[in-house]
Amino acid sequence: MNKRRDTLWLLLAVLASPLARAAEPTVDGVLAVHAAARGGRERWQAVATLEVRGVFTAFSRREPFLLLNQGPELYRFETAVSGMPTTYARGPGGTWWIEPFLGVETAQRPIPGYVRQLDRAFQMTPGLLLAAARGDKIELAGPGDVDGEETLTLRVTPAEGDPEVWHLDPETWLEVAVDSRVLDYTQKEEPMDQRAYFSDFREVGGLVLPYRVEREYLSRHTVLEIEDVKVDAPLADERFAMPAATDGS
């Protein structure tokens, strides 16, 4: 074990239990330093809304995107994929989407597998904070590696769905990558491995956000690049509601 990792284990042990100098870190200790690196739990809990704009790249085509978040549950992500308007959203009545690649040209309810995937992908609150709040099982998985760089890994197992492996940078405590199982939005329902990369973290209004998120699965490669973030801008509730005229439930 190298000197940097020795220091890491000691720091985490102290953060996790000031009265006990444990030889190994704890999950609570890791979550505490990660939450602080992302701006702090209290700051995220105080956020009412987020309005995020930027560029989304899929199939080598760059398109503008808009992501709205209100509270811990509601979101709306809209962009165009291969020129076709696409929307993923969660309103007071549940998750809905307009997904032309799957033949969904008017708002409908996705199948449960897609619902879990969308809800995890488009909520801006840090995923590990959400996992802890949901009561997901979180375990230390030891040291890891992303493209030759050392990471500390956590295994997150939700009550429903497949586990995720989170890779944290042991210097910044920010997420470097997340390994998960996903469904391809543009093909038939078929689980596959995905790795999401997070980089270019910036502070906005006391929050720390990754301004670049890349996702790779099979031959697919998507990139989300943030250009502007507004914190606590007023948002109308109807922005998240599923259009009543196309309710497929």
Image (cartoon, grey):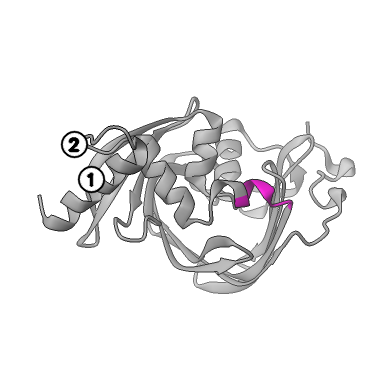
Query: Which amino acid, mark 2?
Result: Ala
Query: How many residues crowd around disc 1 within 10 Å: few (fewer than 14), some, or many (20 or more)?
Result: some
The residue drawn where x is 53% and y is 56% is 39
Find numbered disc 1 in the image and state the secondary structure of the residue it sits on. Answer: helix
Residue 75 x/y as whole percent: 70, 49
Give the residue number, with chain letter if any, for mark 2.
23
Give the residue number, with chain letter if any, for mark 1.
9
Q: Report the magenta residues as a range.
A: 43-48
Residue 2, placed above or below residue 10 = below
Residue 77 x/y as whole percent: 67, 56
Query: Which amino acid, mark 1?
Result: Trp
| Residue 118 visible at all | yes
Viewer-proximal residue among 160 and 45:
45
The residue drawn where x is 23% and y is 36% is 21
Q: Is residue 49 magenta?
A: no
Disc 2 and disc 1 in contact, CB within 8 angstroms: yes
Tag on residue 17?
Answer: none
Q: Main secondary structure of the magenta part?
A: helix
Q: Is residue 78 left or right of residue 160?
A: right
Q: Quadrant of residue 149?
A: bottom left
Name, please, the residue furthest toward the left.
1
Residue 214, placed above or below residue 160 = below
Residue 206 x/y as whole percent: 60, 62
